[in-house]
Amino acid sequence: MIAAPQRLSGWGGVAVESCRVARIAARGRVAEMIAQDFPTGQLIGRGLGRAYGDSALLPDGIVTDCTGLDRFIAFDAESGLLTCEAGVSFADIIKVFLPRGWFLPTTPGTKFVTVGGAIAADVHGKNHHRVGSFGNFVEWIDLLVADGSVVRCSRSAEPELFFATLGGMGLTGLILAAAFRLVKVETASVRVRYRKTPDLMATLAAFEAGDAGCEHSVAWIDCMAGGAALGRSVVMQGSPATRAEVASRGDPLQLPVRRAKAVPFTPPLSLLSPLTVKAFNATFYGLHADIEKLVGIDSFFYPLDAVRHWNRLYGPRGFVQYQAFFPRAESVAGLPRLLDAVVRSGAASFLAVLKSCGEADGGLLSYLEPGHTLALDIPYHPRSVPDLCRRLDRILLDHGGRLYLAKDSLMSAETFRAMYPRMDEFLTVKRRVDPEGRFVSAQARRVGLAS
Ligand SMILES: Cc1cc2nc3c(=O)[nH]c(=O)nc-3n(C[C@H](O)[C@H](O)[C@H](O)COP(=O)(O)OP(=O)(O)OC[C@H]3O[C@@H](n4cnc5c(N)ncnc54)[C@H](O)[C@@H]3O)c2cc1C
């Protein structure tokens, strides 16, 4: 039942641990299996391993692979309420429900995440400014807690546990199943307006001017451009396309077939050097024109999914994603400081993404509130990147910002405490349902969330 230790990492490949993995497949038997096979040890849930750092790693406990919990349980075609097991992936949901005219209410930049992982990180998409995080659409969660019981928590039943579990990174228990709302779509396309902006202030102004009128909004930022071009971007603002708009294109709910490419192995060195990234960024920026067009849901929401294992391009050292949130009042001052520090460091950040954010959803450790979030991929080097991240952390702290646990690999306990003011509320709930601290991850130990 529990496999021999294996090397396991997050998506960024920086944190690597030797972990024992238990794969669970029947939610009715999970409690019994845990009681039998590891009655006292520590454990942590894992989905598809798309968190970048060590949040689904546990070197001396059991990593519980939940991807075998992959059953749909019920769907209400009136309200869009889907009930399913926690290992169902967003890709599975799209495959089954998009042809019937339903889509995810919000989605991260990859569809290879599980429902359990999406709830545990309280993920957000390009529409946070309009709808907030995934948690806003979750009606209830079935959670296996440390004493072996399954608790159904929601906004009305066990609300403290519900809001600790949304964004709680698996530390309150194992999510076995959940019910959440899908939204209706007429087509599998998005009508997107692309606009180039010459600098950061113009990018923020484009968000300000266009966000209210569109469902999805994101800017790709050229993080290799400094000086007057600091923050130059391609802003993409879109809304679900109507049937009338795609009338001549066959079945409007059919996704175009994309031939999956793959990076077959990890090259001995990162292929993303400052030179290659600079050339890519300049070409990407240069090629984009100010246009409006229809784009398939796959290409708009999941451009990186077109290349399987693209993370291998970073070579054996891997990469970190630094995702920084600035509250709205601080964005204008904080974002240029952060970007400038990145440009000056020479760290080659390829595909940096900026989004505007709306209201928080009440999750005690949930990440976003009104403001902006900037995500940067940085090739890892042990001699320079931890120092750079500490410098960036200081800028973030100066402006009341925070880092995203789902992307973090390096944050210290002190920094975490300063960034997450509801940490103690979270720990109070955790201690109530998990007094012996059975649910823990390598990340939780590092940032001080292992009670
Ligand atoms: C290319 C890419 C783009 C991304 N874009 C975004 C984005 O735009 N917005 C965003 O919010 N995130 C984004 N992410 C991050 C991703 O959405 C989250 O890390 C998500 O949690 C991954 O889900 P997973 O199933 O892979 O979970 P894992 O990575 O396996 O685990 C993540 C966390 O969830 C917990 N967990 C998983 N399953 C369970 C369970 N059944 N019960 C309890 N805890 C569980 C784990 O313990 C861990 O703490 C992106 C990631 C990638 C690789």
Image (tube, rainbow, N blue to C red):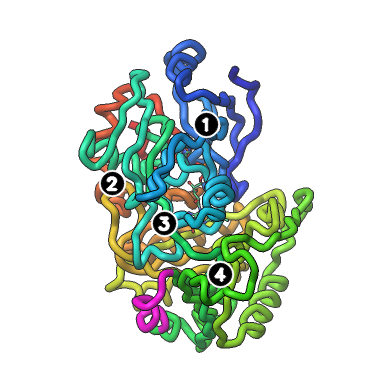
Q: Is residue 121 left or right of residue 157?
A: right
Helix, strand or loop under label 4? helix
Real-space Cα separation, disc 2 to disc 1, in angstroms: 26 Å
Q: Is residue 121 left or right of residue 255?
A: left
Mark seen at residue 69? 1
Q: Which is closer to the viewer, label 3 or label 2?
A: 3
Q: What is the magenta segment's predominant secondary structure? A: helix
* Residue position marked by numbered label 3 in the rendering: 183
Residue 65 x/y as whole percent = 55, 31
The answer to whether the residue labelled 3 contacts the one labelled 4, judged by CB atoms less than 8 Å apart, is: no
Q: Which is closer to the viewer, label 3 or label 4?
A: 3
Q: Is residue 164 visible?
A: yes
What's the residue type where badge 2 is placed?
Leu
For marks 4 and 2 on the same chain, the one whose residue lies earlier in the sequence: 4
* Residue position marked by numbered label 4 in the rendering: 345
Q: Residue at x 36, y 32 (%)?
A: 142
What's the residue type where badge 4 is placed?
Ser
Residue 105 sits in which quadrant? bottom left
In the rendered image, the quadrant that contains the N terminus is top right
Q: Is residue 212 magenta?
A: yes
Q: Which is closer to the viewer, label 4 or label 2?
A: 2
Assess disc 2: are there few (<14), some (14-19) or many (≥20) residues with their C-alpha within 10 Å of its C-alpha. many
- Asked whether 325 or 124 is in front, the reply is 124
For marks 4 and 1 on the same chain, the one whose residue lies earlier in the sequence: 1
- Asked whether 394 or 102 is in front, the reply is 102
Residue 357 x/y as whole percent = 36, 66
* Residue position marked by numbered label 2 in the rendering: 364
For marks 2 and 1 on the same chain, the one whose residue lies earlier in the sequence: 1
